[in-house]
Amino acid sequence: MDPVRNPFAPGAGQRPPELAGRTRELDAFEVVLERVSRGRPERSLVLTGLRGVGKTVLLGELRSMAVRRGWGAGKVEARPEAGLRRPLSAALHRAIRDLAVRHRAPDRVEEVLAVLKAFALKANPNDAKPRDRWQPGIDVPAAVGRADSGDIEIDLVELFTEVADLAADVGTGIALLLDEMQDVQAEDVSALCAACHELSQSGAPLVVVGAGLPHVPAVLSASKSYSERLFRYVRIDRLDRSDADRAVVAPIEREEAEITPAALDELFTVSGGYPYFVQAYGKAAWDAAVRTEIAEEDVRLAAPEAESELAVGFFGSRYERATPAEREYLRAMAELVEGKDEPAPTAKIAEYLERRPSSLSPARDALIKKGLVYSGERGQIAFTVPHFGRYLLTQD
């Protein structure tokens, strides 16, 4: 079929396949927006799950929902070894601009922007030369004595309070969306928890919606013991069979094409119901089909092409980040679980490699930090990427 019309290509279609089966999460967030808008207390939300289950796409849709209701919304992607102050400033600047068009007091908006600028400027090292100092692009003088102490926990509480009050002025709220939450530095995690706690006490209209790998709850709990009371955790998993089929059939039908039941069976088998893989195999099957109906044989012929692209862009790009010692650890994991998406006992990995468990700790900890593995429970380690073990067993 016409590759130009391929509904599974990145950016194609009106509703990405990753959102199929996420009605529960969308409805739950609608309730959050409504409750907060009415001044009722509500916990912030954290989406957790493996790579490839559509957390980032879902986060983007939640942001759009907030904007459609007149909320200010900003999105941050955390990065390892990078502080949160600078990207958070940019996200909240965007959210304030969303609110400014509805606010009737420009002076009040400028007051909040001044506090935001004071907060942002503290991202610069104290000894930075003037020419090297980062400027946040906020065209008002920085406030003095508000969110500028240099202590991220104190400053974030003050900043969130100011921004939430601005949203309350226009009867809406602020949604701060934070992706790759497991990469937030420990000091910033503590500050984020403290700020959310303060807001929950006051009922201020600001919610944080985070997304990250399955061990994010443990990261938050290690920072603040009360974190479980601040966030509602929602596990995002692979699609069940009916939702996976809907993710395939809906975009195909929009292009006035069809797919056979046997082809749907094969697509579910090879994709495992993971949205990223559904899209990858669906795209390849569309390109391979010569008729307006995708058949089982089309999926089988297309599978190697999809797997080749995944091997480079999805698996390979992550595998390349690992050192030789870390790759040895990953291969041992894959061998022990026989390529399945299952956790491996850390003691068995040490036994398999004929090493002391303590000698493998640096490799394991580095892999966790790089987001390639996670520990769901003590003594267990698992891949953050679905089918990664299967991929590793094919590598020489």
Image (cartoon, rainbow, N blue to C red):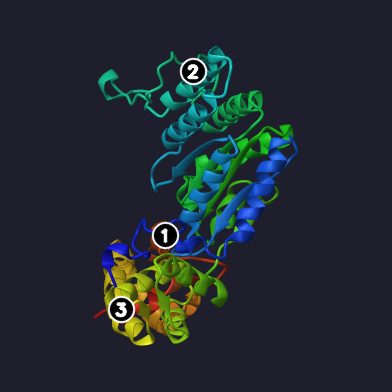
Locate residue 287: give its quadrant.
bottom left
Q: Are marks 2 and 1 in contact (CB under 8 Å)?
A: no
Q: Read off the residue under disc 3.
A: 289
In the image shown, does 154 or 237 lie closer to the viewer? 237
Whether residue 151 is visible here, answered yes or no, is: no
Q: Are marks 2 and 3 in contact (CB under 8 Å)?
A: no
Q: What is the distance, in whole Å, between disc 2 and disc 3 at their CAs?
A: 57 Å
* Residue 175 coordinates in the image, percent (x, y): 57, 39
Q: Is residue 196 above or below residue 311?
A: above
Residue at 35% over, 24% down: 135
Residue at 60% over, 54% down: 26
Look at discs 2 and 1 and give the one toward the viewer.
2
Q: What is the distance, in whole Å, between disc 2 and disc 1 at their CAs?
A: 36 Å
Q: Is residue 154 above or below residue 341?
A: above
Q: Read off the residue under disc 2.
A: 114
* Residue 281 coordinates in the image, percent (x, y): 36, 74
Look at discs 2 and 3 and give the one toward the viewer.
3
Locate residue 314: give its quadrant.
bottom left
Q: What is the distance, in whole Å, between disc 1 and disc 3 at their CAs?
A: 36 Å
Amino acid type at circle 1 is: Gly
Residue at 42% over, 71% down: 278
Task: Provide the secondary structure element on which disc 1 rests.
Answer: loop
* Residue 229 coordinates in the image, percent (x, y): 70, 48
Q: Are marks 1 and 3 in contact (CB under 8 Å)?
A: no
Q: Is residue 389 left or right of residue 39?
A: left
In the image shown, does 44 or 393 lie closer to the viewer? 44
Amino acid type at circle 3 is: Ala
Q: Which mark is residue 371?
A: 1
Quadrant, the N terminus: bottom left
Q: Earlier in the sequence, mark 2 or mark 1?
A: 2
Q: Earlier in the sequence, mark 2 or mark 3?
A: 2
